[in-house]
Image (tube, rainbow, N blue to C red):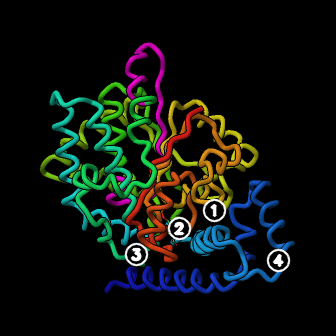
Amino acid sequence: MTKKSFRIIQIMAYEMLNAVGRLYEPFSILLRIDMSCIFLKIFFIFVFQNEPLLTWYKSEWLFVECYLYRLIYGAFHQQKHLSKYDYFGEQKRDSFKEHLRHIEESAKFTLEASTSNDGIHDVVEALVKSSLWGNQSDLSVSGGDASTVKHSLLEAARARDSYILQNDVEKTIREIILPLKERPTSHHRIDIILDNAGVELSMDLFLADFLVHAGLANNVILHGKKFPWFVSDVTSVDFEWTLQQMENDEGDLKKFHERFQEKLKSGKIAYTSHDFWTYPHAFCDMKEAAPDLYEELAKSNLLIFKGDLNYRKLVGDRYWPWDYSFEKSLCGFLPTSLLTLRTLKAETVSGLSAEAVERMKREFGEDTKWLTSGDFAVAQLVKV
Ligand SMILES: O=P(O)(O)OC[C@@]1(O)O[C@H](CO)[C@@H](O)[C@@H]1O
């Protein structure tokens, strides 16, 4: 080993220890880092005033989780060389590699569907459902085990409808997505608020690409996170890495990459991120805490919110009665029509039909594991 590389390792090791040591300085770092937003400050002060001796077990789950991820980010962000280091990066990359077979299968499907005479409706349906079931993979739930998508995504798209407890996919396609094609003169935009990297992101890219390819949207905007979040959430680095992997492929993924890249270059598909996505706020606070984002989202024809965490923030992570109106549980958040695609991993849900609630009670009795197992899903639409 040369003297120079030894020195680099020494510095990295020092910074790593420093960063980990920082994690034992609760709250102080967080309050120094990235606190430019006045609403974030007010939020923290409010929480601390109510509960000065706040601990993991005493606070709200959503808040302490967000706090934890910001704390880790803050500790690394303060280091000179490790400030951009993604401590979850390797796990996210593994999730892509271990699901490569599913990903290649869906790339092939997307390419073939684009040239065949199959109805656009059926293709969009398969891609939306693949994107939904892609959310079964979640490293923050599996403790880093990458192989958590239990079924081929396309197979799931066809065969797992009975696991979607509230299924508005058909309604969304019929009432929002397909009519966009019939209005070629106006500008159509669909936004996807991304969740996990790896297999889920890949499914989202296939969907985004096809929406533009089929003339259903002039623009698809993908929203990611600004820093590592809930282990597997997509950052710009994950987005670039995924495209790079596709480009390096020999077969259908490479072909898919070419046409996706063209759409990126022409601006038809764009990747963006906003600080708000890594705040602890429920989305009903967005209008006040991030009015610029709210206004931007309002320009879209449809917002597709991916995953469990986005769902929790949509409904404020509250214990709603399961059959309570989903629209009302948004507490006023509705910049434009929205569809949520989420497998259930946390104990909050609303908008289920009386039949679905009855069925879960019949099948599971008092046991509420169906709310957290990731086996069941919801696809819920609210139209403006
Ligand atoms: O948003 P995702 O990836 O679908 O799920 C994230 C999530 O399940 O992971 C956490 C477990 O720690 C939960 O807080 C959260 O809801």
Determine whether, in the image, residue 150 is placed left or right of residue 252: right
Q: As rendered, which of 336 and 222 lies closer to the eye? A: 336
Q: Amino acid at mark 1?
A: Asp
Q: Residues within 10 Å of mark 1 (few under 14, many from 20)?
A: many
Q: Are marks 2 and 1 in contact (CB under 8 Å)?
A: yes
Label 1 to label 4: alpha-carbon separation: 19 Å
* Magenta-drawn segment: 177-202
* Outermost residue toward the right in this view: 49
Q: Amino acid at mark 3?
A: Ser
* Outermost residue toward the left in this view: 251
x and y, in percent, of residue 196 in the image: 42, 59
Q: Amino acid at mark 4?
A: Glu
Q: Which mark is residue 142?
A: 3
Label 1 to label 3: alpha-carbon separation: 21 Å
Circle nearer the N terminus (1, 3): 3
Is residue 182 on the magenta stretch? yes
x and y, in percent, of residue 344 in the image: 47, 63
Quadrant containing the C terminus in the rendered view: top right
Q: As rendered, which of 373 and 3 lies closer to the eye? A: 373
Q: Are marks 2 and 3 in contact (CB under 8 Å)?
A: no
Circle nearer the N terminus (1, 4): 4
Callout 2: CB less than 8 Å from ligand 1: yes
* Outermost residue toward the top in this view: 185
Q: Which residue is mark 1?
A: 317
Mark nearest the camera among 2 and 4 is 2
Instruction: Determine the residue positioned at 21% across, 32% down.
Output: 114
Instruction: Determine the residue positioned at 57% across, 73% down.
Output: 76
Determine whether, in the image, residue 381 is placed left or right of residue 124: right
Mark 1 lies on a secondary structure that is loop
Mark nearest the camera among 2 and 3 is 2
Mark 2 lies on a secondary structure that is loop
Q: Are marks 3 and 4 in contact (CB under 8 Å)?
A: no
